[in-house]
Amino acid sequence: MLVVYGLKNCDTCRKATRWLTSEAIDFSFVDVRKDGIDLPEIRKWAAAVGWEKLLNRQSTTWRSLPDALKDEIDEARATALMADHPALIKRPVFDQAGVISVGFKEADKSRLQKQPVS
């Protein structure tokens, strides 16, 4: 089954889940802020897509971090920060039978349509 990780109030996550529902694609949604997400899962995502792609540098949370911390960011620090502050995770994150992808754009729709319905 497709698992969608995101934030309940994220516009892009809502758009993605509405689209998945309209396409009759079976999925479950995990709110990373409410339900939590652990560091090993974030590390798995970072290994799959790259920590730079996973880190949401456009978020208010990122902008509120001290510059010294942002200037010294690396994979270990980034993944630890994302575990502590789930809003730093670019979203939605899709786990499609172990295949991880991030974001929801037109190109993602065709990939998600190929998801076998369970």
Image (cartoon, rainbow, N blue to C red):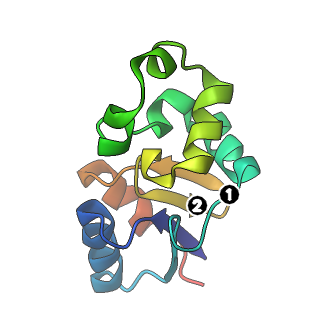
Q: Is residue 39 left or right of residue 99?
A: right
Q: In the rendering, at what x and y percent does residue 4 appear?
A: 49, 68
Taking depth in this image into account, of 11 and 66 the one nearest to the observer is 66
Q: Quadrant of the N terminus?
A: bottom right
**Is 104 placed above or below 53 here?**
below
Q: CA distance from mark 2 to mark 1?
A: 6 Å
Q: Residue at x 52, y 49 (%)?
A: 85
Query: Can residue 57 be seen by looking at this rendering?
Result: no
Q: Residue at x 29, y 37 (%)?
A: 58
Tell me where residue 10 sits by quadrant. bottom left
Q: In the rendering, at what x and y percent does residue 23 appear?
A: 32, 81
Q: In the rendering, at what x and y percent does residue 84 appear?
A: 59, 48
Instruction: Say if mark 2 contacts mark 1, CB within 8 Å.
Output: yes
**Is 102 placed above or below 72 here?**
below
Q: Residue at x 37, y 50 (%)?
A: 103
- Label 2 CA crowd tier, 10 Å (few <14, some 14–19, many 20+): some
> Label for residue 98?
1
Identify residue type, mark 2.
Answer: Asp
Query: Can residue 77 be seen by looking at this rendering?
Result: yes
Question: Which residue position holds label 2?
Answer: 95
